[in-house]
Image: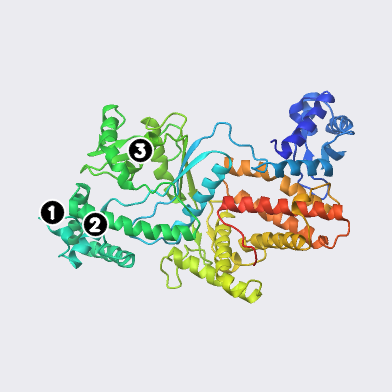
Amino acid sequence: MKKLIDLLAEEMQAAFEKAGYDASYGRVSVSNRPDLCEYQCNGAMAGAKAYKKAPIMIANDVVAQLQESHVFSQVDAVNPGFINLRVKEEFLADYLKEMAADEHLGVTQAEQPKTIMIDYGGPNVAKPLHVGHLRSAIIGESLKRLGRFMGHKVIGDVHLGDWGLQMGLIITELRHRQPDLVYFQEDYEGEYPTEAPFTISELEEIYPAASAKSKEDEAYKEEAMEATHRLQQGDAGYMALWNHILNVSVTDLKKNYEKLNVTFDLWKKESDAQPYIPDMVQYLKDEGYAHLDQGALVVDVKEETDTKEIPPCMILKSDGASLYNTTDLATIVERMKLFHPDEIIYVVDKRQELYFTQVFRCARKAKLVDEDTGLFFLGFGTMNGKDGKPFKTRQGGVMRLETLIGEINDEMYKKIVENRSVKSEDAQKTAQTVGLAAIKYGDLSNQATKDYVFDVDRFTSFEGDTGPYILYTIVRIKSILNRYVEVGGDLAACSMSGASNESEKSLMLELGKFAGMIENAYEEKAPHKICAYIYDVANAFNHFYHETKILGEEDEYKKQSWIALLAFAQRVLETAIDILGFSAPDKM
């Protein structure tokens, strides 16, 4: 199905051709003066030089060809050569009906679906999720859903940090606390216990304690490094402990990601890439991509066009140890082998841009990916408090993600109870639904690359550009439709017709932009454009609602058209918020 703006452009292009001008001048855009017109065409201005004619003359010639248009109800040539356009209500209604009949609301599905991998987790095991993990999770989740809505195969990977010194630190601390555990008995040959010797709470206390000790006690740090080495060499007892750490951590991580309505197709780990490292390193050496620099193995990735210094990508340290670069490159090798993706997108803090520039250039230079494989770094900005500094607890520490979610839910519960619009037994569940919208919309409505202020009071408000306002609008629509059905109305019998007032037409025009907006948001990897769109739709609906007595209308034909429009608006809004990763309750 063609986008609305493309259909308008086709009508304009045909008019330019009939008037004797090149069709390419018939481009149409949304009007920047909605008080004057709905759409506009500036092609006459662009064509003036080529045809050595005044723009207003060209505009008048084109307008003359559109007097019998089935698309435009009004076409005006305005000095010095603009063409102002209004769309026919019947044409618009027919377009919306065609959208409504389409499973994807007019969004054309990919003819050649891509396989896209999104790396949008990155938490370390044995550590709780904190607010620093929020943006990666919810931006990545929305991109995954957006790609799937466009018809692509999208694979989400959490990519856990489970390999390295942190594991050695945990094992060492456990050995100090519980030296009699069978995992530390050199001569033990039996089966290791299936139950972990620690809970998630104990595990989350063990790591920071061990990390602090290692900074003060050199011998302790050496012991942890030795434990890391033994683990990576496959020590049976240490591997068993490592598996316990993973199982306990992943169970807790899944529970917390579930609260965010974030899911992953793959729970891959840094350790999964380790088997690929030896062959990859050998390949980089054999093919001449890597060379020694002060004992370290590196790949030069600078390019002639660079305006700033891009250091080499280090593959192995001088002592032969691997680094994050090594693991990330090996992960790319693994992903190409197992999934052969057309694109890999990393949703990571924007401060890591240089690092990913090095890794991507190395992967391309060494042909670890195909020539046409897309490697994208979507760097996001910092989530700050009202003081403009990174978001902290009241005590100044890094806030746990579940604490933040809890605080938002509590605030929403308080407001819902005050409104008395939901039964007390349903209030808690409703608060969680609206709280999630407050968090996700509050984040996603900002351009991903920009820092933003996480303002609990503003994000939980039922007014303004917020998640609760969007949900309140959807709930209001649901309420009207339910009341219509309760008095005997049949939703299936309702059909949209031409707009009977300006506010209705404004809502119809906004709904008609859905497909173009979704395609643009996908191309630019920009969930904030979906937020901006649903805010415009919500405002257009509320303006229409306040101007129109929908259920009180005596003209049944007109009422049915309005009810059909509302049902369609609800579907568009709920489809959009589902892509963003949240849903609407039935009451608020």
Q: Quadrant of residue 132?
A: bottom left
Amino acid under label 2? Leu
Q: Quadrant of residue 581?
A: bottom right
- Circle 2 sits on which residue? 241
Residue sitting nearer the eye, 463 or 92: 92
Mark nearer the N terminus (1 vs 2): 1
Residue for point 36% across, 56% down:
250
**Disc number placed over residue 474 in the picture, else none:** none
- Circle 1 sits on which residue? 189
- Circle 3 sits on which residue? 334
Amino acid under label 3? Glu
Above or below: residue 572 compared with residue 23: below
Mark nearer the N terminus (3 vs 2): 2
Residue 125 appears in the picture as rendered = yes
- Which quadrant would the N terminus be assigned to in this image? top right
Above or below: residue 343 compared with residue 402: above
Residue sitting nearer the eye, 358 or 131: 131
Q: What colouring method underlies this structural image?
A: rainbow
Residue 419 lies left or right of residue 284; in this view the side is right
Nearer the observer, disc 1 or disc 2? 1
Mark nearer the N terminus (3 vs 1): 1
How far, Cα to Cα, is label 1 from label 2? Answer: 15 Å
Amino acid under label 1? Glu
